[in-house]
Image: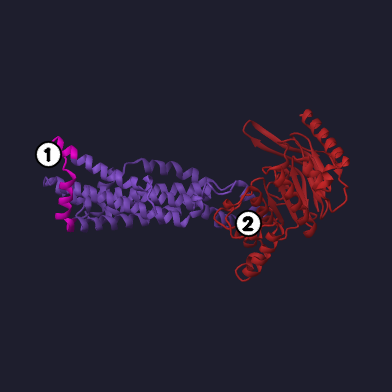
Amino acid sequence: MIALDNVTLTYPGRTGPVTALAGTTLHVRRGEFAAVVGPSGCGKSTLMKLVTGLIRPTSGTVAVEGKPVTGPVKLAGMAFQNANLLPWRTVLANVMLPLEIVPPYRQRFSRDKAAFQDKAMALLNVVGLGAFADRFPWEMSGGMQQRASLCRALIHEPALLMLDEPFAALDAFTREELWCVLRDLWQKLGFTVILVTHDLREAGFLADTIHVMSARPGRIVETRAVDFARPRDLDVCYTPDFTQLVHELRGRIAEARQAA
Amino acid sequence: MKLSAEDIAPVAFTVGLFVIWEAACRLFRIDTFILPAPTDIFAAMGKYWWPLLKNSFVTLWTTMAGFTIAVVFGIALGMVVGWSRTIYRGLYPVMIGFNSVPKVAVVPILIMWFGIGEIPAILTAFLISFFPIVVNVATGLATTEPELEDVLRALGASKLDIMRKVGIPRTGPYLFGALKVGITLAFVGAVVSETIGANAGVGHLMVQAGSNFQMPLVFAGLVALAVEGILMYAIFAAFERRMVAWAFRSSTGAGG
């Protein structure tokens, strides 16, 4: 579904041109849960912007659904480390924001508002925020805000969900809770995910495939299939195989950092 | 409800100021022509209540007229400036230069153009108060979180969509903050213009009273101005709290 072939991205920095990505090749199948891990500053977020068409590569090709990306792809939902909810909107109204923008929902928004509200409520119920729909974001904890942010990213039923370290700012318990929320949503709705993270356990628990990136200029140095049986339980994180996986990934990243 | 020290403080400080003033005037036997005591001022206010009220009303309406123009013009220009970086870069020095010119210096020109009357006062109020509105609206728009913009652009939102859904609501607290400051500035502008050349308004009244050596009346005019200023500020502050309550989120909330 997503294909980056030999992508290089250079942009003018303050002290001369910066090469964020050099010859990156990455393929993600439809419905796959892909994780991209790597040392900080390796261009993981740049990768996300390339896939969604927010920036164009200097060379190489980016294609989504077989078509080259020439502008914002319009089918992606995104969530970041900061929930970025609008403080003047209630949680429900925040979640409904994409429906006011994405066609064909936007044309029907005022007519089908009630139906859309039900849709948003259903999604909020899945992530356990049903009772908080009328709250304002600033009345909620970071974990709750992040749940709402996930709902906002998914309300328009995108084929692709892009996550840029969405759980990085949360405490360990909340993070694991949200892993399960994301796992359940993915299993229920079947979208394609690209999760950028520096948490190897997060990648191991959630992903089908883990791509390891090198330090800047970033490129994919290793791709690993993760074949723990689904549906996965948090207990999988405490099996020897899992520990082994995380350990090996850690080794690869340490190498990638050294190489820089 | 029990009143706390914090609730009483504004009244206590105001009353205290007048008491000290009164005491100082009596103690040092300060001449009424130099500094009238509060009791003299209040007496003058009682005696001349009708001219004070009439002229206060003139000042009020010229202020509001100028301010209304400033709000409309300021929001429009602020949006244009906040919309495009090129326009922002181009207009900014012009606006800074314009704002640096003391408006007192412009009033004689306005009087030359429009004659003695209310128009120079309205225009001065407008000129002096539109700048903070432009700057604040533009700042509100220009500081939209880039990640939020990415989220919306990845959905295929146009620049206009982002402006409508995020930029404009986000500007609210900046705008209302600017209105609060702007209204007092507009008031200053109107009064300045009235003192230089007008045939009505509190500024005009004070100049006339001054040339007749009616110092208590001059000070009564000052008090009238202060009261009017506080009221207008309070109205816009209350307005702000109502319109953008979300910007005053409580620090005790669970937010992160």
Residue A56 visible in the current orientation:
no
The residue sitting at 63% across, 64% down in the picture is A106
Question: Dot 2 lies on which element?
Answer: loop
Residue placed furthest toward the bottom: A111
Q: Is residue B44 magenta?
A: yes
The residue sitting at 64% across, 66% down in the picture is A117
In the rendered view, does B124 fall on the left or right side of A28?
left
Report the disc number at residue B55: none
Of helix, strand and loop, which mostly describes the magenta segment? Answer: helix
Based on the displayed image, in which of its 4 quarters is residue B158 positioned?
A: bottom right
| Mark 2 touches mark 1? (CB < 8 Å) | no
Measured Cα–Cα span from mark 2 to mark 1: 70 Å
Q: Position of residue A122 (x, y in %)?
A: 69, 63
Q: Position of residue A259 (x, y in %)?
A: 79, 29
In the rendered view, does A209 fall on the left or right side of A138?
right
Say which of A182 and B168 sits in front. A182
The residue sitting at 68% across, 44% down in the picture is A170
Residue A112 vertical placement versus B61 (above, below): below
In the rendered view, does A49 fall on the left or right side of B218?
right
Instruction: Name the residue tied to disc 2.
Output: B157
Query: What amino acid type should be assigned to the residue bearing mark 2?
Result: Ala
Q: What chain letter is assigned to the residue under label 1? A: B
Q: Which chain is purple?
A: B
Question: Dot 1 lies on which element?
Answer: loop
Q: Nearer the viewer, mark 2 or mark 1?
A: 1
Say which of A123 and B2 sits in front. B2
Based on the displayed image, in which of its 4 quarters is residue A151 positioned?
A: bottom right
What's drawn in magenta, residue-wise?
Answer: B23-51
Instruction: Name the residue tied to disc 1.
Output: B31
Q: Which chain is red?
A: A
